[in-house]
Image (cartoon, grey):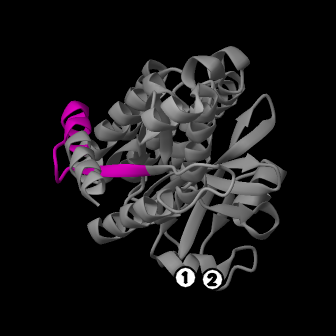
Amino acid sequence: MALTIMSTNEAELLPKREQLLDIIRLQTNIAQLGLDLGSVMALVVDRTLTLTGADGAAIELAEGEEMVYRAASGVAAVRLGMHMSMASTLSGQCVRSGQMMICNDTETDPRVDIASCRQIGIRSMLVLPLLHLKLCVGVLKIMSRQPHAFDEQHASVLQLLTEVLGAEIFFAAKYATDDLFYRATHDEMTGLANRALFLDRLHHAVAHTKRSGTPLGVLMIDMDGLKAINDRFGHRAGDQAIRAFAERLRGILRNTDTIARLGGDEFAVLMQPVPDTATLFRNVERLQAHLNLPYPELDFTVAGSVGLAMAPLDGIEPEILLEKADQAMYIVKREHKRQ
């Protein structure tokens, strides 16, 4: 039997013992989260920073002709939910080729969107395809403020993750579009998330905040005057009002926010990411103002009252955040009644 001797250069490319143990623990955590794709991706990008020493990490999924930031941490966090053309990005080229891409310097590499990189101060990137049965579903990308920050050793570490992550994304996306799954997690009347899905995402978001310290906003929203509409115009008109109110929420809030109908005239929103407290307050004020604008499609008046709680400022447990947001909402509702 021949004994193969590994060269020094080959040995240097292998993940270190502690990195291997971290990857094994991460793979176990992924398996425990099951088909909760959002939590899996959030966990991976958080832990990838520790594994590689990168300044930012992201998972971009291929959706049509666009790459969409579905999870992001570090300097990339501000891009969560952003859509970018597949044709103009290094991530898009990675998806189309199915091959790893390294950019040593964004200032000199013609393959990258230099303006986008400059916005968050990125100078180098490593992009790996997320493959399942030769189908590329997206990419795992790490970023650095320094040029020439990544090499084959970083790639060897992340490649141990990409196969399991690619399969997880493939199956989670498949089941997420299944009709039975959709009906179990969404409100039939409005198509918004239902209470069960909202609470599940809230618990995972709070866990993420505990790990990373990044803030999140929880809104409780109540329709004003729905009972009067039902009494005067009938429940069919009330249902019409609920659907119009839900569409107004969709039109104002971001794709990254989870909007839910908890039941009756009660709605909730999980706002992520939150860049800072001042921006969050401005967004809530804008939401409140838009909810109370006229609804041209309705023959009666619809309005809403919005209450806000913010983690970790107002607490770090889901129940406390919901209670404080609810209390804030009732203060606003009483003010509306006095007007």
Q: Amino acid at mark 2?
A: Ala
Q: Is residue 289 above or below residue 214?
A: below
Q: Nearer the viewer, residue 303 or 85?
A: 303
Label number found at residue 118: 1
Is 339 left or right of 119, judged from the image as shown?
left
**Residue 332 belongs to magenta span:** no
Quadrant in the picture for the C terminus: bottom left
Which quadrant would the N terminus be assigned to in this image?
top right
58, 293: nearer the viewer: 293
Q: Position of residue 117 (x, y in %)?
A: 58, 76
* Residue 308 painted magenta: yes
In the rendered image, is residue 71 in sight? yes
Residue matched to label 2: 115
* Place of residue 218 in the rendered image (x, y in percent of width and height, measured from the top left): 33, 46
User: Quadrant of the rendered structure where residue 91 is?
Assistant: bottom right
Disc 1 from disc 2: Cα separation: 5 Å
Judged left or right of residue 134, residue 19 is: left
Mark 1: amino acid: Arg
Q: Which residues are magenta?
A: 304-325
Q: Nearer the viewer, residue 118 or 239?
A: 239
- 10 Å crowding of disc 1: few (<14), some (14-19), many (20+): few
Left or right, 226 with reference to 238: left
Residue displayed at 65% across by 26% down: 176
Residue 202 at x, y percent in the picture:
36, 35
Q: Secondary structure at mark 1?
A: helix
Look at 44% across and 33% down and name the residue there: 227
Q: Is residue 127 left or right of residue 145?
A: right
Residue plotted at (54% across, 44% down): 158
Looking at the image, do the residues carrying marks 1 and 2 touch, with CB atoms under 8 Å apart?
yes
Helix, strand, or loop for circle 2?
helix
